[in-house]
Amino acid sequence: MDAIAFQGLIGLSMAMYLWLISAGLTIIFGVLRIINFAHGSLFMMGAYLAFTFYGQLGLPFWLAILLSLLGVGLLGLVMERGFLRRIYGIDEAYQLLLTFGFILILDDAVKIIWGGVFKIPAIPPFLDGAWRVFGRPFPVYNAFVIAVGVAVAVGLWALFEKTWWGRIVRATASDREMANAIGVNVPRVFSGVFVFGSMLAALGGALGTPVRVVAPGIGAAMIIQAFIITVIGGLGNLKGAFVASLIVGILSAYGTLFFPVFELFLIFAIMAVVLLLRPQGLFAR
Amino acid sequence: MKKGVGILSVLFVLTLLLLPAGPAEAQCQLGVPVIKIGVQGAASGPHADYGRQIEMGATMAIEEINATGGILGCKLEIKFMDDENKAATGVKNARYLVAEWGAHFMVGTDSSGVAMAMGPVLAELKRIHFFTHAATHRLTEELVAGKGIKEIVRVSVPVYQDAIIAALIFKDRPEIKRWATIGADYEYGYVAWSMFKDTLKKYRPDAEFVAAVWAPFLTLDFSPHVSAVMAQKPDAIFATPWAGEAVMLLRQALIQGVFDSQVQAWWQAMGGSVDVLEGIASEVQRDRFKGKLWATARYIHNWPDTPENKAFNERFRKRWVRLPNYSAETTYSSLFIIKAAVEKSRSLETPKVIEGLKGMQINNPGGLRVFRAEDQQFIYNVPAGRPMMDPKYPIPVLGDLKIFAAKDYYRYPPFTPVAATK
C-alpha cells in the first residue's frame, strides 16, 4: 500500500513538469489559436538558460530561474512579433512550417552555443536530501516541483478569474473581433499571451535543470507529451490541461510500477481511451 | 635578345615539366583519388557526445595516417553523419554514404538497434562496416556467425562486457541475492539483462530477479523507474541507460536515497564512459555513492598503463581538449585496422579486405586486439571498477579494477540464443 502511495506522489511530481509545459501551450492555443510546435524548444531554452545562469555563472538558483524566464520571454516576444504575427488567420499549414522551423533553428543554436554534450549542474543544497514519506525517502526536490506546479495552477486561476488582464485575455480568447470592437488592443494581448506561455514553458525546463540533463532534443521529448495532454484535456482548456497532466503523470508512474513492459505506449493508450469516450477532450471549450 | 628570351622560356617550361612531383602528388597505389571512410554515430540528444567522440577518434586517426603517407600512398577522407540512434536514419545514411558519396569503408554507430538494421543492408551494399560501439551480441553471433554477413566487423567489446563481467564480479558477493534492472528500452537493454541473468544463475542459483523496468530513449526523468524498482527492496541494481541518461538516472537515484538504502551495489554498465564520469564528478568527489557504484566501459582512458595508451591520451587531449571516450578509441583503432587490412590485401575490394583481416593481431591504445574469424570480432579486454577521484586526472576514473581475461568472458561458438525481448 505504501509503495502504491509513494509511486503516486512521484507521479504527481512528474505531472507538474507536464502541467507547466502544457499550461503554456494551452493558453497560447486558447487565445491565439496557434499550435506552437516550438513550445518544446522554449522549454529546452529555459533549461539551457537556467543552466548557464546557475551552473556556469553561479547565480542563486531562484535568480537563475527568473532570468531564464525573462530570457525566454524575450525570445517569445521576438517569435510572436517578428514572425507569428504574419501568419494569423491564414492556413494552419503555415503555422506548422514556421514553428517547426523554429525547432530546427533553436536545436542547432543550442548545439552551437553550448555544444552537443549534455549539461547538469549541482543540486541547490537547500533542495537536496529527502523526507521520509510512506516509509521511503521522498526527494525534497520532487516536493519542491509539486509545490511550484500547484502554486502556478492557483496563480493562473487567480490571474484569469480575478484580474483585469485575465478578463481581457479571456475576452480576446472568446471573441477577438468583439474584443477589438470594444477597444482591446488585440495584437498587444496576443504578444503578452505568447510571452506568458513561453515563460511557463521555460519554467518547466528551468525547474528540471538540477535533476535532469540539459541536452539538445529534450524539447522534442516533452512536446509530444504536452500535445497529448492538451488533446486529452480539451484544446484550449486550462483546467483540462491540469487534470490531464495529473492523469498522465500519475498513471504513467503506476504503469511503470505495475506494467513496466508497456512503458512505451502507455501515454498513447490513455489518449486513445479518452478520445474514444470523449473525442472533444475531458473539458471541452 | 628576343631569341635568347625565347630559348630561356622554353628551357624554363621544360625544366618545370621534368621536375619530380612534390609529396602532395605521391602515387596512390590503389588507383583512387582518396580513400573514403563513412562515419556514423549519435550526434543529437543526451547521447550526442558519443557521435562526437566517434568523429574525433576517426578524424585524429586519419590525420595521423595521412601525415605518414596514407594507406599505400593514398590519403584518407571521412564524412560523418548523425544516425540519431534511429535504425531508419542509420540505414538511410549508410546507403547514401556508399551509393552517393562513394565510401570504401564505414565505421561507427552507437545503437544496437541501428546496427541490427544495418547488418543485412551492408551485405547488399557490399561494404564493410567496422562497428565501434553498438553492443548487441546478436550482431556478431546471429548476423555473422549465423547468417554469414562478412561485411560486419566488430572492434569494440560487445554486451559480454556489460552483462557477463557484472555476473563474474557479483557472484562472489553472497549478501547480494535480489537483483532489479532499470533497463534501456531497446535491443541493448534487453540482451544485457537477459545475458546477465543467464550467466549469474549458473553461479548463483539463489539469485532472484525481483523487478525489471524499462525506459526508452529520451526519457527525461527516471524517478518513477527508481521508485518502482525500490518498492521491491532489491539488494542490487543493474542499469543500462547510458550517456546523459545514466547521469540523470544516478542523480535521481541519489536523491531517492538509493545509495543510503539496503542496496549494496549499483552496476551502471557504461558508467566508465568519459561523459558519465564528468557528469557524476561532484557526487564522486563527495562520496555520495558510498562505494556502491560499479561500472565498466569499452575502453577506459587510464587502462592499460602502457606508453602507447598514455601517448594516445596525450595526443587526444592536445587535439580535442578532452579525454578520449571509449567510442573514440575504438573508432580510432578501427581506422588503423583498416590500414593494416588494406596494406595486407593491397586492395580496397571488400572480399579481399575481409581476407586481409584474418589472423590479424594489432596493438591499439586499448591493448592488443585479436581478430576472430568465426564472428569477425576483435577480441580484447577492459576492466570494471568503481568511480573514484585520482589526482592524476581532472575527472573521476575507474579504480579498484577487476580485470578479467577476454577468454574468460567472451562467448564462443557454437552460440546459444539469448532472449532479446523484455
Image (cartoon, rainbow, N blue to C red):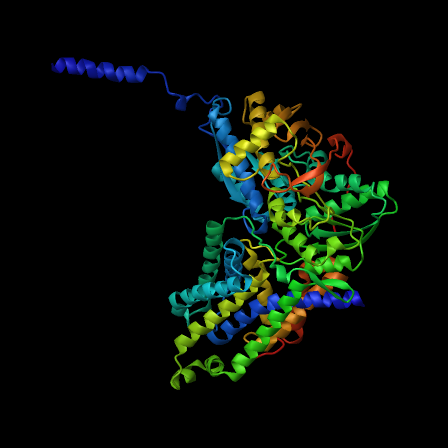
Left-right relation of B205 to A282: right
Furthest residue toward right: B206
Relative to B12, does residue B328 appear above or below in the rendering? below
Q: Quadrant of the N terminus of chain B?
A: top left
Whether B422 is drawn above or below B50: the answer is: below
Q: Tag count in the figure? A: 0
x, y percentage for residue B401? 72, 36
Front one among A197 and A92: A197
Asked whether residue B99 appears in the rendered view, the answer is no
Q: Which percent across, then down, holds residue A278?
A: 64, 76
Tell me where residue A95 sits by quadrant.
bottom left
Question: Residue B63: x and y, percent?
Answer: 48, 30
Q: Nearer the viewer, residue B38 or A156?
A: A156
User: Measuring 49% from the left and 25% from the top, which residue is drawn there?
Assistant: B70
Residue A257 lies left or right of residue B23; in this view the side is right
Q: Quadrant of residue B230?
A: bottom right
Residue at left offset 51%, top offset 60%: A41
Residue at 59 percent across and 74 percent down: it is: A151
Residue B105 in the image, given as x and y percentages of width and height: 55, 33
The residue furthest bottom is: A182
Work out whether residue A202 can be spotted. yes
